[in-house]
Image (cartoon, helix red, strand yellow):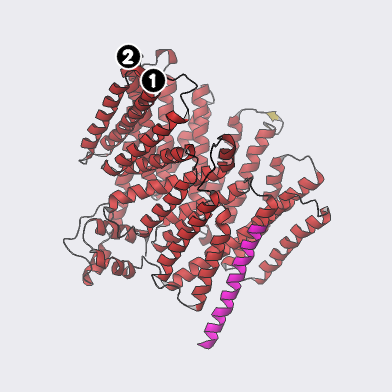
Amino acid sequence: MQESNRNTIIALIENGNIKEENINSVLSLLEIIPSSMAWYNFIDKLLLWFGGLALAFAMMFFSAYNWSALTHIEKFAIVEGVMFLTIVAYLYVDTQKLLSKVILMVSSILVGVLLALVGQTYQTGADSWQLFFYWAILILPFVSIGRFSALWIVWIFLLNLSITLYMDTFGRFFGFYLYEESFALWIMFIFNTLAWSIWEFSSHRYYWLKSNWAIRLLGVVSIISITWLVLISIVDSKYIFSIFVWIITLLLLYYIYRVKKIDLFMLSMGAFSFSIVVVNVLIFSISWRHFELLHIFFIGLVVLALGAGFASWLKSLQKELSDERV
Amino acid sequence: MKEYNMNVWEKLSEQGLVEGEKPEMVVRTPWYIKILLSISGWLGSLFLVVFIGGIIGLVLNDNIEDFPLLLTIVGGGIIFFTYNMFQEQRGDFFEHFLLGLSLAGQGLVIVSVFFILTRNSTFFSMFDKDVLLPIYLFSALFQAFLMWVMPNYIHRVMSSFFMVVALSGFFIIINEPFIINTLLTFVVTWLWLNEFTVRNHARVEAITYGLTAALVFLIYSLFSFSYYIYESINFENKIYFSLYIVELSTFAIFVYVIWNLFVKGKKLNSKRGFLLLITLLVFAYLSIKIGGLIFALILILIGFAHKHNLLTALGIFSAFAFLSTYYYYTGETLMDKSILLALMGVGIFLGRFMMKIVLEKEVSDV
């Protein structure tokens, strides 16, 4: 049963169509209340995830504690031993089952723990971006065989983190000194948009990539990056190129998520980005010396009008969608 | 707004579970559109507050702090006006405008109370306990009133959120920063458990969303900064309602959830089910030290029990957030934390292993 059935029940209860004494029967009939078997499966999965993550985090905290009673070799032996065990366990588990995905996730976390332990033990002097970058590179085999969207998101997150930390450390790229924050945002925008596009197009081919939440997450990061870049351009009155790219991004977003298919979440993000940019253009186009109360009132009205206008448009699209379904 | 699924009506009608006329089809607004509306309402209201404040400042020659009563009357008038306007459906823009206007009115009322309380204060005594305590209390009561009275969904969500924030400020000042966690966890849990049977559903649903969001925000800030709170606020008295009591009460609420979902509903009433519940309870008990994790678990379980995907997602997101803040707790060493997490992990896998044995035995018996 879809979640929309839940909404239907709520609507009918609010409307007085269902008597209080019948509510439980209705919930059972429409399978809103899960069966015992559904509960078994759900709690089993939940415990599996929490158990796996608890062990991985335990190892991370243990390694960070830097216990002086243990020698370096013993510490490495513990972390590597556990990692070895997880890899062996993976070989004996059905790769179609959730347990295999949990094991791969734990192994991937342990790789990071091991790298951090190397840095802690040998004081390599390496920058923090290197930790996350090499972590991402080393877990690539796990990510590739996992066929698991959450693991790919972890991988993309690590690369995003290393890009940010790299720019924080050097502010330059391939020898070009670029101290501006905007350069890191450009790299993040390009990287995440690429990941988003590849994911979106590959999701038609590979069933395990059909995770709406992952595509949306990548879309959100991309849109935030380009919107931020546009805001910097508005404040600095330079880098007009970012405005051009932002317009192209919004047009593509509209084409893919309105014309090709309808995704209200993505369209909401586009609407949000558009509203923020328009309001900032209005604020920064008025000279501070000539800023008057009426300007403030006008900008307030524009903010409200944009929010209401987009909400109205999105609701009409939603209505269109539900009419098609009926 | 709601979504009526035609097949559902026919299905329920056949069983005689619905009565009255078949309702017209209307569409329920998704949560992200509601958030879009809330943010722009909030932002728009900021501009309106500045505008109205500026107008009043112009009229009063920039001495607005000398006329707190006037500010209260203007702010109260604005809220009363929006209350009346909200009574009828007036379209998205107007509804949105009213939301912004009401927030602006609330801002004026609270600022006026601040001016009244600080009338004879110097700048440094403006943020004393004697000033902040009544402001927080007034704001909480004021928001509680609006939360119940204002006939608008997003307004109720926002008012209930602000009410909790103000209440938590109040409890921090009276040296009991954690009491609100337990109280609110129970209220939110009860509301979600009874969401289908509670009266005034539309009103209560909006309030429950606001309270839930506020509680996640509150737990995250309290547990991220709990030790900073201890250090930065010089508590004159001992905290009576200690963190330990909060932890135990939250666990008791978790047991209440388990009882409601499984024991009362006669779910999982086999040997394997019993083991599953015991594992879940042991896991929850061990996690009481990880602030908020039990609440996240409650959200996940109720979300699944009621097919409420948004609640489940919020629970999962909160669980990650609470787990990550655990690293920074200064009250325990990393070794203690590591041992606790390892115990949790081993306990869970042991429980699962035993369940597997029981399942195999059940199958072989059959």
Quarter of the picture holding the C terminus of chain A: bottom left
Q: Amino acid at mark 1?
A: Arg
What is the x, y in percent for residue B210? 38, 46
What is the x, y in percent for residue A134? 71, 48
The mark total stands at 2
**Quadrant assignment, res A123:** top right
Where disc 2 sits, the SS reads helix
Of residues A259 and B362, which is closer to you in this image? B362
Q: Residue at x 31, y 29 (%)?
A: B105
Seen in the image, is A118 located left or right of residue B318? right
Q: Earlier in the sequence, mark 2 or mark 1?
A: 2
Q: Which residue is mark 1?
A: B119
Q: Residue at x 22, y 71 (%)?
A: B14
**Quadrant assignment, res B47:** top left
Q: Does residue A47 belong to the magenta stretch?
A: no
What chain is tagged by disc 1?
B
Q: Amino acid at mark 2?
A: Leu
Seen in the image, is B94 located left or right of residue A231? left
Magenta-highlighted residues: B339-366
Seen in the image, is B240 located left or right of residue A12? right
Question: Which mark is on residue B58?
Answer: 2
Please name the predominant secondary structure of the magenta segment in the image.
Answer: helix
What is the x, y in percent for residue B207? 34, 47
Dot 2 alpha-carbon crowd within 10 angstroms: few under 14, some 14 to 19, many 20 or more: few
Say above or below: A62 vs B346: above
Dot 1 alpha-carbon crowd within 10 angstroms: few under 14, some 14 to 19, many 20 or more: few
Disc 2 or disc 1, which is closer to the eye? Answer: 1
Of residues A315 and B103, which is closer to you in this image? B103
